[in-house]
Amino acid sequence: MRAVVVYESLWGNTARVARALADELGRTMSVRVLDVESAPGTIEDYDLVVVGGPTHGFSMTRPSTRESAVSQNGAPRAPTVGIREWLARLPHISVPVMAVAFDTRVDTPRLPGSAAKAARHELRSLGFDVAMKAKSFRVHGYEGPLVDGELGRAVEWAREVEAVLRGAPPPPAEE
Ligand SMILES: Cc1cc2nc3c(=O)[nH]c(=O)nc-3n(C[C@H](O)[C@H](O)[C@H](O)COP(=O)(O)O)c2cc1C
């Protein structure tokens, strides 16, 4: 089995979750972890696609929210491409490969909207099998760090994803 984890991250929190997921998935399959800026324009020959990004403005980031993160919130740099733009350019797939989406979001206040839900919607439109619900991981403030225990939740979720990939029924959504 082969998996690819494509992530976007301004401060590194989503990247840490992506690596935790990849490490766990990597116990049973071959995994590539790619920053979205260096991800290829097509996804081929994978059994599982994992897409993750930070929630900005109740959804996936936009060029304007990434620039604002730098100018208003002190992010080190704005990625030139986010998962929104990457997904928008992906071609429709012919075989329904399993895909899951995750995001990071602030812990407080609890805001509506989620980059992962928006990404999952795009993945479904592209023909992926999105049987599993979107997953969120929480950070303190805009810059993080991740809330205690979130990397452990990432490991648990990776195990659930792997089980579904191997035929288990998808678990119910938490929220
Ligand atoms: C411009 C901007 C808008 C944001 N909007 C939201 C939001 O709508 N909901 C939310 O929960 N977090 C929001 N956040 C917080 C981000 O989700 C947080 O910065 C991100 O999870 C950190 O992940 P990263 O280190 O991978 O960039 C926003 C952050 C920025 C900079």
Image: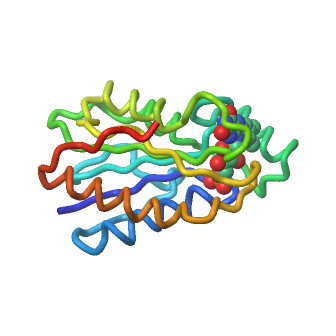
The residue sitting at the top extreme is 125
Q: Is residue 98 left or right of residue 125?
A: left
Q: Is residue 55 left or right of residue 91?
A: right
Which residue occupies the foreground of this view, 108 or 129? 108
- In terms of image quadrants, where is residue 132? top left
- In terms of image quadrants, where is residue 128? top left
Callout count: 0
At x 64% / y 60%, what residue is drawn? 146
Q: Is residue 147 left or right of residue 97?
A: right
Residue 108 image position (x, y, % from top left) = 72, 43
Residue 168 image position (x, y, % from top left) = 15, 50
Q: Is residue 71 left or right of residue 35?
A: right
Q: Is residue 66 visible?
A: no
118 up-or-down from 26: above or below:
above
The residue sitting at the bottom extreme is 27
At x 41% / y 63%, what residue is drawn? 21
At x 28% / y 75%, what residue is drawn? 27
The residue sitting at the right extreme is 72
55 up-or-down from 138: above or below:
above
40 up-or-down from 57: above or below:
below
| Viewport quadrant of the N terminus | bottom left
- Looking at the rendering, the quadrant in which ligand 1 lies is top right
